[in-house]
Image: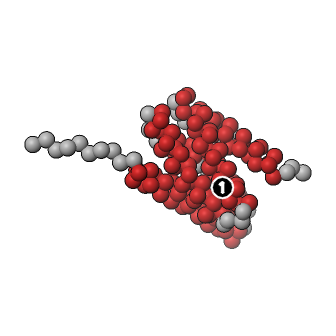
Amino acid sequence: MQSVPEEIIRALLGAFFGTLGFAWLVHAPRRAWIPSGMVASLVYLLYRVLTVLSVADPMAIFCGAFLGAVAGHFCARKLKMISTVFLMAAVVPVVPGLGLYRMMACFGQGQTSLGADYGIQAMITIAMTALGLAMGSFVDRSLHRQKAHPVVR
């Protein structure tokens, strides 16, 4: 049996390397791979810490996605790259792939009620991820507004 720190370290490494693989798969620029993996690991760490502290799963996912958006925009500014590269990577650890798979498997086996439950949980996860990314991006853009060019008359 693993202790909680060992489990978290293993999961962080999984989030980091899984995101590296995802970045490679979508042809993200090489110099974005390590920062993307670090952003994804941060997202998963916050999500995992909040779930260990008994925060509801949707709220933990929202907080993780929010942190991922803020960290992703920071990395994009520092590396002078488009933020989508980092925002896409930030959500890799919280994508509800297993929930969607279970939903389809249950539907295929005729267990529509259980499949619907899995589907609803997956849709809540997707909604909270999108909301967290949107709110994080909104906060970042509010804090880092670009200076408007003065009107020349």
Q: Is residue 53 visible?
A: yes
Question: Residue, x 58% and y 38% (percent of image)?
Answer: 36
Residue ranking furthest to the bottom = 113
- In the rendering, at what x and y percent does residue 103 appear? 67, 61
Query: Label 1: few (<14), some or many (≥20) within 10 Å?
Result: many
Which residue lies at the image location 70% right of the left edge and 55% below the top edge? 48
Is the residue 146 above or below the residue 130 in the image? above
**Above or below for 29 versus 123:** above
At mark 1, the secondary structure is helix
What x and y, as percent, mark residue 123? 58, 62
Is residue 97 visible in the rendered image? The answer is: no
Residue holding disc 1? 47
- Res 14 → quadrant: top right
Q: Quadrant of residue 49?
A: bottom right
Across and down, in percent, residue 21 comes to: 64, 35
> Between residues 131 and 107, which one lies in front from this camera angle?
131
